[in-house]
Amino acid sequence: MTHDDDLAADDAGAPAEDDALRARLRAADPARGLPPLGAEEVAGLVGRVVAEGPGGDLRDGAGDELAVRRARRLPRRAVVALAGVAAAGVVAVAALTASGGLGGGSTVELAAADGAGPAVACAPVDVAALRTVGTAFEARAVEVADGRAVLEVTDVYAGDLVADGDEVVVPQADPDAGPVDGGPLPVTAGGTYLVATTPVGDGPGGAQQIAPCGLSGPDDPALRALYEEAFRAG
């Protein structure tokens, strides 16, 4: 057999191989079972991609008009690909929202204790005093800087001001000074704290402050026992 005969034989087998390859590609195409999009759906989809994509700064309506012209020239497979990109974006946004995405829970800022200070006369810390507070929770200090501390809520005892996973920003006392009756709560990064809050001023609503006088403090067996009895006993 001559070289020309070999080439002729290869050419004869090529169409069959091409058909087999096309069949495999069609079988692997995830969009093969999708019905074709209507003209209005195509125009709307392409309009959004054109208007909202990178560099897209078209005014309202301009994207749709341009999309109608471009959609007439788009093959069906290109339209399916665009639809897949749009669907993937929707799924990503939904997943991000469900997980808390960009930041997670809410952030609550507590005010400095109203009129607090060493001169404040504090009542004994007991179950009855704890039951007068509006909110009580356990939290872990994740950041301490610039005169304030950020606490991450890990367990809610009472109230609906915060939920697990929320961040609470509190005024920061000097951690080296130790607790002072009526003063701010000294916080150390990484520590766990039991925190109670009361309204600032006379009204029940509005800003909240950390309840002073030992109702809030570092987690220890004695204070935790009071929290458990005040909010969870019975």
Image (spheres, rainbow, N blue to C red):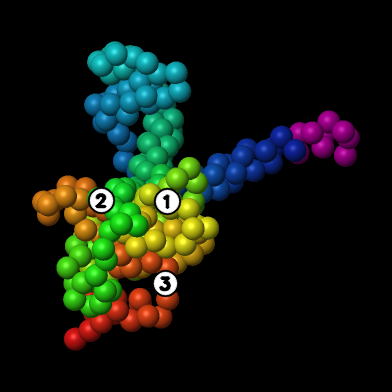
Name the outermost residue toward the right: 2
Q: What residue type is labelled 3?
A: Asp
Say whether residue 59 is visible.
yes
Q: Residues within 10 Å of mark 1 (few under 14, many from 20)?
A: many
The alpha-carbon separation of the residues under discs 1 and 3 comes to 17 Å
Percent of width and height locating residue 205: 13, 51
> Which secondary structure lies at badge 3?
loop
Percent of width and height locating residue 161: 23, 57
> Which secondary structure lies at badge 1?
loop
User: Is 201 situated above or below 190?
Assistant: above
Percent of width and height locating residue 34: 35, 43
First along the sequence among labels 3 and 2: 2
> The magenta stretch spans which residues?
1-9
Q: Which amino acid does label 2 sit on?
A: Gly
Left or right: residue 54 compared with residue 234: right
Q: Does the magenta stretch include residue 3?
A: yes
First along the sequence among labels 2 and 1: 2
Percent of width and height locating residue 78: 44, 30
User: Is 167 situated above or below 217?
Assistant: above
First along the sequence among labels 1 and 3: 1
The alpha-carbon separation of the residues under discs 2 and 1 comes to 16 Å
Label disc, if present, on residue 172 of the rendered structure: 1
Q: Which amino acid does label 1 sit on?
A: Gln
Q: Which residue is drawn at 29% across and 48% down?
A: 111
Pair 3/2: label in front: 2
Q: Residue at x 16, y 50 (%)?
A: 201
Q: Which residue is drawn at 19% across and 76% down?
A: 128
The quadrant of the rendering that contains the N terminus is top right
Label disc, if present, on residue 115 of the rendered structure: 2
Left or right: residue 157 compared with residue 153: left
Q: Nearer the viewer, residue 31 or 171?
A: 171
Residue with the mark numbered 3: 219
